[in-house]
Image (tube, rainbow, N blue to C red):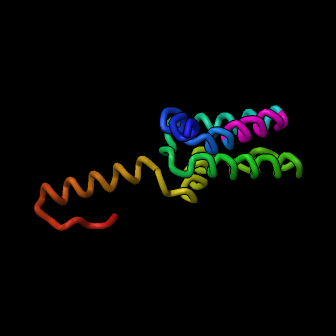
Amino acid sequence: MAARWIEKVTGPLDEKKRWRQYKARTRRLPANYRTAVEAIERYLMYFGRGEAGLTTMYEDLIDLFEQSAAAGTPIRDIVGADPVEFVETFVQNYPDGQWRIREQNRLNKAIADAAGEDERPV
């Protein structure tokens, strides 16, 4: 019962455990890979998405960088010439919870309502 109360206040404990594990894995990367992952993480936190699916996305990101580091894959071979394009493409694999999609849908619905139209899917 106490755990349920704590989760109501702090959020799901399982998600927090997974997040701490992700951060520990990030710290174990070689310095240049860690710097790249932390830069991508910072970008995603600011421009990326809401809560739904967040931990899974970061776990997949760290999997990619751990495997690439183990194989000696250069960072540019992972992210390409345009890191923003890499991140935007990566995020498209996790559409649930993206605040932009929610806001696009909200905008489309509001305009359709204002115009007296039926709601149109995006």
- Placement of 70 over or under 11, stated as above or below: below
Quadrant holding the N terminus: top right
Residue at the outermost front position: 1
Q: Position of residue 95 (x, y in %)?
A: 50, 57
Picture quadrant where residue 44 is located: top right
Residue bounds of the magenta highlight: 19-30
- Residue 79 visible in the displayed image: no
How many numbered marks are there? 0
Relative to the observer, which residue lies in front, 18 or 42? 18
Residue at the outermost left position: 116
Does residue 51 appear left or right of residue 25 in this picture? Answer: left
Residue under the image location 60 percent in, 54 percent down: 90
Residue under the image location 51 percent in, 50 percent down: 52
Q: Main secondary structure of the magenta part?
A: helix
Question: Does the stretch in magenta take in 110?
Answer: no
Does residue 6 appear left or right of residue 40 in this picture? Answer: left
Relative to the observer, which residue lies in front, 1 or 36? 1
Q: Position of residue 63 (x, y in %)?
A: 76, 51
Does residue 113 appear left or right of residue 10 in this picture? Answer: left
Residue under the image location 53 percent in, 41 percent down: 4
Q: Position of residue 87 (x, y in %)?
A: 60, 48
Relative to the observer, which residue lies in front, 2 or 93? 2
- Placement of 122 over or under 39, stated as above or below: below
Q: Position of residue 79 (x, y in %)?
A: 69, 48
Question: Does the stretch in magenta take in 21?
Answer: yes
- Placement of 16 over or under 119, stated as above or below: above
Residue under the image location 18 percent in, 67 percent down: 118
